[in-house]
Image: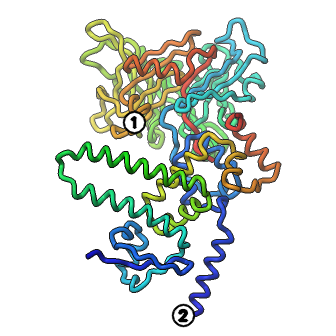
Amino acid sequence: MAIMYALKSSDNEIFEVEQKVIEQSETIKKMIEDGAATGEIPLQVSSKTLAKVLEWCKQRQHKTVENENDDNKGKRKKERDEDDDIKEWENKFSDELKADKDVLFDLLLASNYLDLPALLSFLCQLVADMVAGKMPEEIRRMFNIENDFTPEEEKAITAEHGWAFQP
Amino acid sequence: MADLNAGKRRKMSDIQLRSSWSNLPDDIICLILNRLHYVDQVRFRAVCKGWRETNIKGRVKSPDKLPWMIAIDSQSSYLSSPPRTIETQACCLFDPLHQRKHTIDTSITRSGLLLNSLVVASKHGWILFGQGTGVRVFHSFFFYSPFTDEIIQVPKFHRDCRNATFTTSPVSSDCQIFAVNNCDRKIYIGIYRFGGDGSWSEFSFDVGEEYSATSDIEYVDGILYTTCFNKSVVGAFNVALKEWKVYPFPASEDHFIYCGGRLIECNGDILMAGTGENRYSYREWIVFKWDRLQMKWLETICLDGALFIGDTSVFYPILKTEEELVISEFRNTIHSCDFNKLEVEITTRCPPKLLEKLLEIYDWDSPYLLRFWIQLPELK
């Protein structure tokens, strides 16, 4: 019987999660080890974001468990198929985040706060892929960021690396 | 208990108020920057104050996995015949991984500074130019960064020099410049420290008949190495101890070395590269590494990276585990070009397929006269 934990989001929603799934978060793992996690574990993460975080953790957990149960025979083909499945799942996950940048932003902060290195790395790569090849103005529009430089500051910044701002 | 909860709630609402992409935590900004190429890093830092003011010093590694190349169409009197007009002068940076060419509106071609100038060394995105009248006799030096179009003049050294190098970026106060000349059976070494009192210090040693003209110099970890090809010796000047020593040239069991003496820094070691002829009269590159314990040169059969040789030379480490295919192919390869001839000659120790790729990613067909390898600067 798997040990279950109750996670409480910042808007007081309860999520029942298997220990193995949630221990991917170093922050929560520490809380459990320190004995601080009796009853509900309160987290500074909204229910919408926490649901996304758990979606990721469950997918990862699924992958590790299956690999552990594999015997070597036929492993290669199975791994290849699994890799394809994971890729497909990750693509779908990325597409959703690209479409809703508020969720992406909250998820970035949550993965940092919960200390989920694999998710954090995945999300940073996603942001990097999104900004690659784009000019500052396009990046601002994409993430709804205000240009808070004075015209003089902006001029100095672009003049310093003039060649990098040519289309 | 009630107070504690109230405090927590206040904190949350603060976070929600401040939550926007321009307030990304520093750790996350560094993680994103580490996944971007140089041009994208520069653009990313220009998006908003929050992204620009993050302290990234020492936290963002250089995305530089292969050297860039700089091409200057100068009217330098050594190279150009007939001399180009100012209008046709241009300076370009080649980004090998993006396969993109960036044209720079450069102040050095406009200012005429390139007249009578030659490239003597390049590191960390900076180029050290020597200015002089004769062939490789320099009476003054200046630094130029094509990435930021900055020029830094170096105070004049009282002696003309034939070789020079430097330790790190000249905007850093621990940057040192070394200039070397030989005459009257002596070697003269000038040292200029950027954080110092603004003057050069000079050291001289009697070298007698055992050492004459210097072919190349390089500084690694406290020692200035110099090569003297016509006497087949290497000089080593220990900067802290002010000691000068001379060692024999490396010898190869399989090759007759007929051209050598390029010194290149490699992960804190010094490499010497030269061309040799094997028993089938086939000309190829040979590389030696100085072993500090045994005090001798050891022939390096396999390079844990790629060696780029030219007017400026640089070693790029490439791990066996490198995942990016374009880069992993460069492991244990040597690429050299002689830009002083008007046509570019490349000698490589690499598969023909990679040679084709190299010609493509550095846009070798462009009609530039001065070309050399350049490392990316540290992101500011």
Left or right relative to B44: residue A71: left
Relative image position of residue A158 (x, y in whole percent): 74, 42
Snapshot quadrant of residue B112: top right
For the residue pair B361 and B201, the one nearer the viewer reads as: B361
How many residues crowd around disc 2 within 10 Å: few (fewer than 14), some, or many (20 or more)? few
Residue behind mark 2: B1
How much space separates mark 2 and mark 1, taking CA atoms? 57 Å
For the residue pair A53 and B327, the one nearer the viewer reads as: A53
Left or right relative to B70: residue B17: right
Left or right relative to B99: residue B247: left
Relative image position of residue A55 (x, y in whole percent): 44, 63
Q: Earlier in the sequence, mark 2 or mark 1?
A: 2
State the residue at coordinates (57%, 27%).
B69
- The chain carrying label 1 is B
State the residue at coordinates (65%, 39%).
B199
Snapshot quadrant of residue B226: top left
- The vertical placement of B137 against A48, above or below, is above
Residue behind mark 1: B318
- Amino acid at the residue labelled 1: Ile
Q: In which quadrant will I find the N terminus of chain B?
A: bottom right
Residue B58 appears in view? no
For the residue pair B107 and A51, the one nearer the viewer reads as: A51
How many residues crowd around disc 1 within 10 Å: few (fewer than 14), some, or many (20 or more)? some
State the residue at coordinates (33%, 37%).
B320
Labels 2 and 1 within one chain: yes
> At numbered mark 2, what does the secondary structure look like: helix, strand or loop?
loop
Left or right relative to B340: residue A83: left
